[in-house]
Image: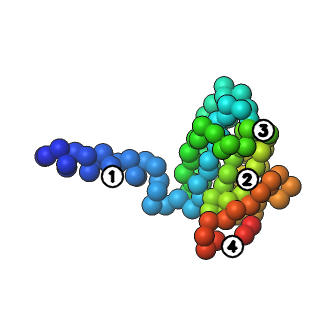
Amino acid sequence: MGIRDGIMDALTAGLKKAAIASAQRHLFLCMGPDCCVPADAEILWEYVKQRVRESGAQAMRTKAQCFRICTGGPWVVVYPEGVWYGEMTKARFDRVLAEHVLGGVPVAEWAVATNALCGQKQA
């Protein structure tokens, strides 16, 4: 096995682990530092990972250092609909997970902005 084969094996394993082929949603979590306390965002991040895994949601999740909003965080954005939720907590995330990620219906009362990806209908 050559180096290239080893890289391709690792890449294939990484793509499978990230669930890229089966994902229907992609969740981004802003980790601060200006919109929220980064340590609090890290606790929420661990919770998001756990709940997505437990729920069986076909969703990828990515943490980001800063969305440049710098207030009202932590922020979660759900794509492909592009729904932005601020002031995220564990309880709020559970509702977003159940209603939006799994149920397909954004939580309108918490949606601060919507910017769907090209070709996607607005939520």
Distance of label 4 from label 1 (alpha carbons): 31 Å
Distance of label 3 from label 2 (alpha carbons): 13 Å
First-in-chain label (2 vs 1): 1
Pair 3/2: label in front: 3
What residue is shown at x 57% (from left), y 47% (from top)?
Answer: 61
Distance of label 3 from label 1 (alpha carbons): 38 Å
Q: Circle 1 is placed at which residue position?
A: 12
What residue is shown at x 72% (from left), y 69% (from top)?
Answer: 122
Q: Circle 4 is placed at which residue position?
A: 121
Pick the front one: 19 or 29 = 29
Pick the front one: 45 or 50 = 45
Percent coordinates x, y for residue 95 in the rendering: 77, 49
Q: Quadrant of the C terminus?
A: bottom right
Residue type at the position of mark 1: Thr
User: Looking at the image, is 94 positioned above or below residue 44?
Assistant: below
Residue type at the position of mark 2: Trp
Badge 2 element: strand
Percent coordinates x, y for residue 74 in the rendering: 72, 38
In-image side of 70 versus 2 (left or right): right
- Looking at the image, the residue that sits furthest to the left is 1
Distance of label 2 from label 4 (alpha carbons): 15 Å
First-in-chain label (2 vs 4): 2
Classed neighbour count for the residue bearing mark 3: other residues with Cα under 10 Å, few (<14), some (14–19), many (≥20): some
Classed neighbour count for the residue bearing mark 4: other residues with Cα under 10 Å, few (<14), some (14–19), many (≥20): few
